[in-house]
């Protein structure tokens, strides 16, 4: 009986030791699989190099201030100094054409008519002062501002050049505004090569194969031939979160994300652009909330690059 009890106790001890070793191994394996270097995979998915026009900030201010003032429906302008999409180019071009038509009909034509009327009076001036004054003021009657501010108490012969100058100056100003609109249309239409800007968007797939959540920074860097380009996360597919406002991005267990990065201070800034074509090897480096760095597989940028014009 004692032997049987001793044997049973020995079996229990063996089972306990085996179970403990199994638990330790399982725990160690789980912990190992939770290491960022083991759990997280970052793969390059593509590089999109865009070339196209932007709406310069001074031109945006001109449209929203000086042009919209004379339109019943304001022109909605896209963000300035950012590459325009084809739809933005199409919409803004159409709106500028609408504005130009309004300026021609409601500003240029009345000014030209007033100037013609003044010159007709000048070519055949009435002899009577009162009629001379009346015809001059009638010539600019449709120009509210000029008519309202026409000097009083001066002779008609002195009033005529004064009005001619006011109308001519106004016509020159409006013509300049029309020319400005035409210049903007040419720039956003891509017809001014020196005004075109470049933008590089980089896509990476991040996969979390573990059972725990990781947090990686939205600000990473691209190491390329000994240089580093600061990148910021612009977009993460299927997420309704403002990624630009985040410091860390959650990578959920058993999930992957397609992430889009661009230059931290604007990819249109030539000082922030890196020519990736001659680069033979590059890799993405991102810091995790644990202060560990996750690095993508090294890749040759040119193999992943697609170039496109936005206009």
Image: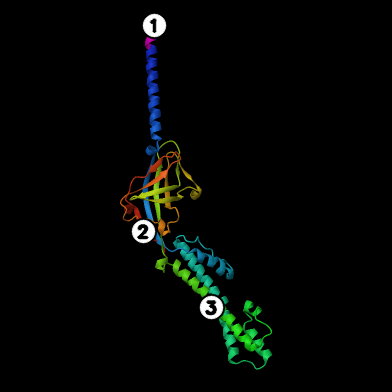
| In this view, 234 is above or below 59 | above
Q: Which of the numbered marks, if any, corresponds to residue 307?
A: 2
Asked if residue 272 lies in the magenta stretch, the reply is no
Position of residue 28 measured from the top left corner of the image (x, y, whole percent): 39, 29
Question: Which secondary structure, mark 3?
Answer: helix
What secondary structure prevails in the magenta region?
helix
Cα gap from disc 3 to disc 1, whole angstroms? 118 Å
Could you tell me if residue 243 is visible in this image? yes
Magenta stretch in the rendered image: 1-7
Which labelled disc corresponds to residue 172? 3
Mark 1 element type:
helix
Q: Which residue is at the front of the view, 209 or 80?
A: 80
Dot label at residue 119:
none
Around disc 2, counting alpha carbons within 10 Å, would you say few (fewer than 14), some (14 to 19), or many (20 or more)? few
Q: Name the residue carrying label 1.
A: 2
| Quadrant the C terminus occupies | bottom left
């Amino acid at each position: 009986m004692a032997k049987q009890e001793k044997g049973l106790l020995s079996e229990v001890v063996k089972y306990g030791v085996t179970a403990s070793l199994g638990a330790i191994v399982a725990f160690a394996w789980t912990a190992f699989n939770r290491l960022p270097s083991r759990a997280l995979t970052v793969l390059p998915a593509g590089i999109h190099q865009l070339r196209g026009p932007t709406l310069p900030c001074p031109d945006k201010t001109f449209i929203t201030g000086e042009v919209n003032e004379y339109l019943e429906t304001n022109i909605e302008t896209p963000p300035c100094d950012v590459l325009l999409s084809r739809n933005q180019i199409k919409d803004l071009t159409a709106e500028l054409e609408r504005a130009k038509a309004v300026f021609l009909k409601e500003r240029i034509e009345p000014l030209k008519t007033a100037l013609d009327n003044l010159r007709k009076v000048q070519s055949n001036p009435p002899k009577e002062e009162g009629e001379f004054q009346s015809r001059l003021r009638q010539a600019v009657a449709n120009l509210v501002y000029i008519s309202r501010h026409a000097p009083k108490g001066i002779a008609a012969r002195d009033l005529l050049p004064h009005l001619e100058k006011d109308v001519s100056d106004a016509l020159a100003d409006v013509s300049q505004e029309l020319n400005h609109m035409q210049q903007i249309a040419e720039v956003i239409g891509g017809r001014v090569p020196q005004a075109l800007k470049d933008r590089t968007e980089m896509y990476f797939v991040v996969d979390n194969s573990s059972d725990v959540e990781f947090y990686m920074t939205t600000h990473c860097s691209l190491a390329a031939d000994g240089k580093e380009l600061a990148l910021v996360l612009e977009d993460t597919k299927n997420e309704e979160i403002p990624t630009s406002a985040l410091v860390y991005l959650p990578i959920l267990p058993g999930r992957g994300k397609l992430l889009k990065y661009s230059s931290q201070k604007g990819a249109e800034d030539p000082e922030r652009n890196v020519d990736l074509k001659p680069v033979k090897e590059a890799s993405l480096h991102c810091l995790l909330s644990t202060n560990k760095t996750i690095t993508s597989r090294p890749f040759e940028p040119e193999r992943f690059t697609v170039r496109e014009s936005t206009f």
